[in-house]
Amino acid sequence: MNPDNPGSLAQAAAAVKARRISAVELTKAALSRAKSSHERLNAFIDIEEETALQAAHRADAALARGEATGVLHGVPLAHKDMYDRKGFVTGCGSKIRAAHQAAETSTVMQRLETAGAISIGRLNMSEFAMGPTGHNFHHGRALNPIDPARITGGSSSGSGSAVGGGVVLAALGSDTGGSIRLPAACCGVVGIKPTQGRVSRHGVMPLSFSQDCVGPLARSVDDAYLLLQLIAGPDGRDTTCVIAPPPAALSDDVSTLRVGILGGLFETGLDAVVGAALEATGQLLSKEVATLAMIKGTEMPSIAELANVIAMAEAGTVHFDWMRERPEDYGPQIRMRLSQSLAIPAPIYLRALQIRATMLQAFLDETFAKADVLIAPAMPFLPPLSSEVDIGASPKMNAVVSGLTSFTRPFSFLGLPVVTLPVAASPEGLPIAIQIIARPWREDQAASVARRLEQILALPAFTSSLPPRSAA
């Protein structure tokens, strides 16, 4: 096996276990890609070469003793700079936490280590996960592997860049209002925002404690879903993590599912090329599923506003002390947003929380009564140019930034699971992605539809760093 072409996560792990390649060879190749891609991608805040190679040698030694049991044994990954690992820095893309060493390991990282995965470094991100564009005042923005003039999306910018740029097969991100889905959409990869409460957030940097989700970005649905299965489930340490059946296996047969194209969310402001891609995707799906219909979701714009109120009020609570004691250590954009968050009245925040359960139940009773899964665009437009969202650089900045999350925030507010999948390329070669939304705890239905689309579309890879996704 070529270490620069390891296939899928499962194939890479199988090759290590069969001794067709060593964990050290795979890890050295990933580290080489991480270092050589720095100017092209700026995806890493820190490349952990020494400790990664030590872990790879341990993995090969364990295999020699017959102790390779994890499903990702010897596979190198990298993750957003917000997951604690004992003795390592968790910087959160910030100056304030730049030297913070974790006292223990987060649950999700412990589960990946137990599965045998090797971490090669900390990935770039929007400072404290606040920012849908992926810009970072302290570390510079991660670059889009398809077009460096375009944004990666945020806040999991380095995850989208490193996976889309072929450095690693998969990476963890986090999603509060679109921070997995936007980088996946901008960088042409798959992202999964799980059901709220599906994955423990113990040892994970908080932003909005009622909307934060941990999830994967990967180059295929199977790889993303495998990571979700590995990290899902309660740990007794995060009281918001729900005891629920684990993510079910994916199905090859989606013919019994009813699919709804979610209208009302995007009746205005949708670029023609995005609308055309959504329509074409619906036509393809109509041949694969039981029914396909346009379904109205008339409350979606107001739900997005409620999601933002909750996220910002809770972010202001998280950062209250630092904003009083160290405001100068925030980047100017984040400092401005946090200052605004501190002005949100408590009654407005509490009212948004109060009506959340009612709105979710109404959405389940009305919208999901007509469909098993929903599809909607990931963004209303193509990945914007970085120059359009730089502070003060463009009069379009506010409209573009608010538009980025207009289609993703509603599902964060409702806590629903979403798979983001590239389904087309624009004439400029930029990815166009959709969201596939399911009922709570039915990530399997959304991902099964996504995988079937992935198979029938047989899209070319959006970057040349890795071979194209295999067609069915």
Image (cartoon, grey):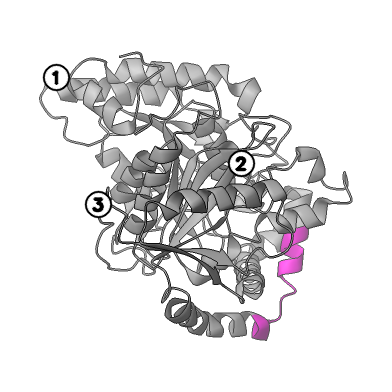
What amino acid does circle 1 point to?
Ala
Residue 184 on the magenta segment: no
Q: Is residue 308 left or right of residue 168?
A: right
State the separation of the CA atoms marked 3 and 1. 31 Å
The quarter of the rendered structure image containing the C terminus is top left
* CA distance separating discs 1 and 2: 41 Å
Q: Quadrant of the N terminus?
A: top left
Q: Earlier in the sequence, mark 3 or mark 1?
A: 1
Give the class, few, some or many, for how many residues have Cα within 10 Å of label 1's Cα (few <14, many ≥20). few
x then y, percent, for residue 69: 16, 35
Residue 186: mark in rendering: 2
Mark 1, residue position? 64
Residue drawn at x 59%, y 47% is 277
Q: Main secondary structure of the magenta part?
A: helix
Instruction: Please tell me whether residue 243 is drawn above or below residue 103 in the rendered image.
Output: below
Q: Quadrant of residue 304?
A: bottom right
Q: Earlier in the sequence, mark 1 or mark 2?
A: 1
Residue at the image position 50 percent from the left and 39 percent from the top = 189
Position above or below: 381 against 23? below
Residue at the far left in the pictured view: 66
Tell me the SS state at disc 3. loop
Q: Is residue 199 visible?
A: no
Residue with the mark numbered 3: 249
- Residue depicted at 41% across the width and 39% down the height: 456
Residue 189 at least partly seen: yes
